[in-house]
Image (spheres, rainbow, N blue to C red):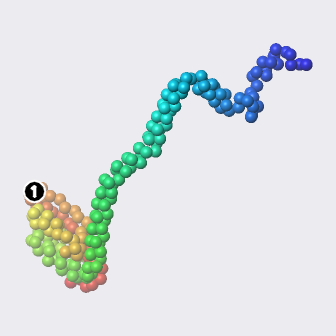
Amino acid sequence: MASNKPGAQADKARRPNPPGGRHSGLQPYWEVLRARWGALAPREQRGLGIAALVVLVAIAWSALFAPALRTLQRAPEQMRQLDAQLEQMRHLQARAEALRTQAGVSAGEALKMLQASIADLGAAAKLQVVGDQATLNLRQADAVALAQWLARPGAALRVQPGEVHLQRDAGSPATWSGTLVFTLPPGGDKP
């Protein structure tokens, strides 16, 4: 008999509905939407249906189809770039294989080749050998002759410079001085 008080009715109105009750979750919103949809004329329902379909197609296009089409459009250019990189790598691989299959030269042979090649530099070049390193000292070497000598492929000389310290001479811009240090191949006799 205690339920006739006005405060008890207000408490009852403030309490949430139990789970599974008539107004649980989104059910009240769906009921409102259904009521509003039913109140619309058939022509308005068709118009809203078409508008919703257009929005869904636009979302599907932008989320699903457009990225895939962009990828397909970029694919030929990416394939050309990858093919060019592959060709360059194959060229480098063939070059490395050619160098690997070349008959190994002894340190003595490499030194002889190096000595013969520096003859083009004239008196400006002096070669000193210490252990497995050959140091080429340059004093006022002609810039053109030095450039041509440096442009020779290392495979022809059979040695590559490990260190290069060159500077243009202050007195003459057409000459260079400095050192180049070569590491000779292991093994063999040095002259």
Answer left or right for 40 relative to 23: left
Q: Quadrant of residue 16?
A: top right
**Which residue is depicted at the point 38% across and 49% down?**
71
Question: Image point 79% across, 22% down: which residue?
Answer: 12
Above or below, 143 against 53 in this view is below
Mark 1, secondary structure of its residue: loop
The 10 Å Cα crowd at callout 1, few under 14, some 14 to 19, many 20 or more, is few
Which residue is labeled 1 in the image? 173
The foreground one among 61 and 78 is 61
Q: Nearer the viewer, residue 10 or 57?
A: 57
Give the side of residue 55 with respect to residue 15, left or right.
Answer: left
Residue 156, percent from left and from top = 19, 74
Q: Is residue 2 above or below residue 124?
A: above
Horizontal and vertical percent for residue 44? 52, 25
In percent of width and height, residue 149 lies at 14, 68
Residue 133 in view, yes or no: no
Q: Is residue 93 left or right of residue 113?
A: right
What is the residue that sits farthest to the top in this orientation? 6
Q: How many labels does the image show?
A: 1
Q: Can residue 169 be seen in this view?
A: yes
> Looking at numbered disc 1 in the image, what kind of residue is underneath it?
Pro
Nearer to us in this view, 137 or 16: 16
> Relative to 2, is 80 above or below?
below
Q: Quadrant of residue 32?
A: top right
Q: Residue at x 71, y 29 (%)?
A: 23
Residue in the image at 37% along x and 51% along y: 72
Furthest residue toward right = 1
Instruction: Name the quadrant of the N terminus.
Output: top right
